[in-house]
Amino acid sequence: MPMIGSTDRAPLVGLPCCTRLVGEHPTHWVGEKYITAVSDAADAVPLLVPALARRFDPEDIVGRIDGLLLTGSRSNVEPHHYGGAPSAEGTLHDPPRDALTLPLIRAAVDGGLPVLAICRGVQELNVALGGTLHQRVHEVAGRLDHRAPEGSAERRYARDAHRVRLAAGGLLEHIAGAPELVVNSLHAQGIDRLAPPLAIEAEAPDGQIEAARHRMAAFVVGVQWHPEYRVLDDPFGRALFAAFGAACRAFARRRGR
């Protein structure tokens, strides 16, 4: 990794935190697999951004970082943010994360910041830009059950859940060097109506949108699956994070940093 302060320093990537109680203690956290994917595959410095939206100006955060990674989470975006019906009883939400990420996404897009969004992250990207979500994809007629199987992390994150068809001529097809991928699947919530600024980058066999990119941005892309899991062992995941890191370095150079 380039030394900070060198002529081609490692870019700084912000990772918004989830919130969770650990015993009686509120915590702000990001899973290690996302942190190491940024450091090892994107060749960037990960910076965790606490979910304290009331303390932070999203434009100020955007002004201090060179890229934004929106991670997956067990929680769902609260449906009132996209005019959805109340969630089923027992659905896990994270209002502090919503309060941080949704305005931060809009500020990032407005500021030309590279954005990579994963799982919950692509759902946040869609909602922040005016789209809606299916809260329970497996209950939508004609859709597959996209939830993870029970068992170990290796079983849940195995990259053999289903194929995705990549949009011809799209960013992900270019990164993959192929028209389709076989991916993992660990989500109940998923994109319903696509936000107007976004274009479909991948679809599952059942028609569920699996990836999207911003039509006008240099690098704003989200995927529903988890390329960060054992990223260095996954050719596509490694290439995706490398492309994200390159976009972040280019953005930093344009800013003169």
Image: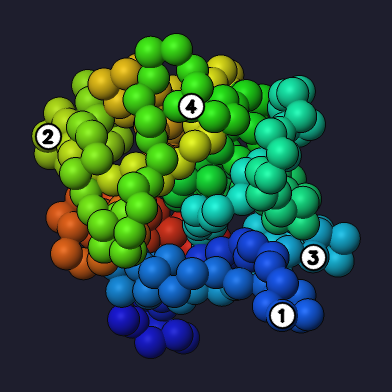
Label 3 secondary element? loop
Residue 178, disc: 2
Determine the image quadrant of residue 27. Answer: bottom right
Q: Looking at the picture, does residue 211 appear above or below residue 14?
A: above
Taking the spot 63% from the left edge, 65% from the top edge, the residue there is 17
The answer to whether mark 3 and mark 4 are in CB contact below 8 A is no
Taking the spot 32% from the left edge, 18% from the top edge, the residue there is 206
What residue is disc 3 on? 52
- Give residue 158's position: percent from left, percent from top: 23, 53
| In this picture, residue 200 sits left or right of residue 71 | left
Circle 3: residue type: Leu
What residue is disc 4 on? 137
Q: Looking at the picture, does residue 84 appear above or below residue 213?
A: above
What residue is disc 1 on? 23
Question: Which is more N-terminal, label 2 or label 3?
Answer: 3
Point out the image quarter for the N terminus: bottom left
Badge nearest the viewer, 2 or 4: 4
Determine the image quadrant of residue 89. Answer: top right
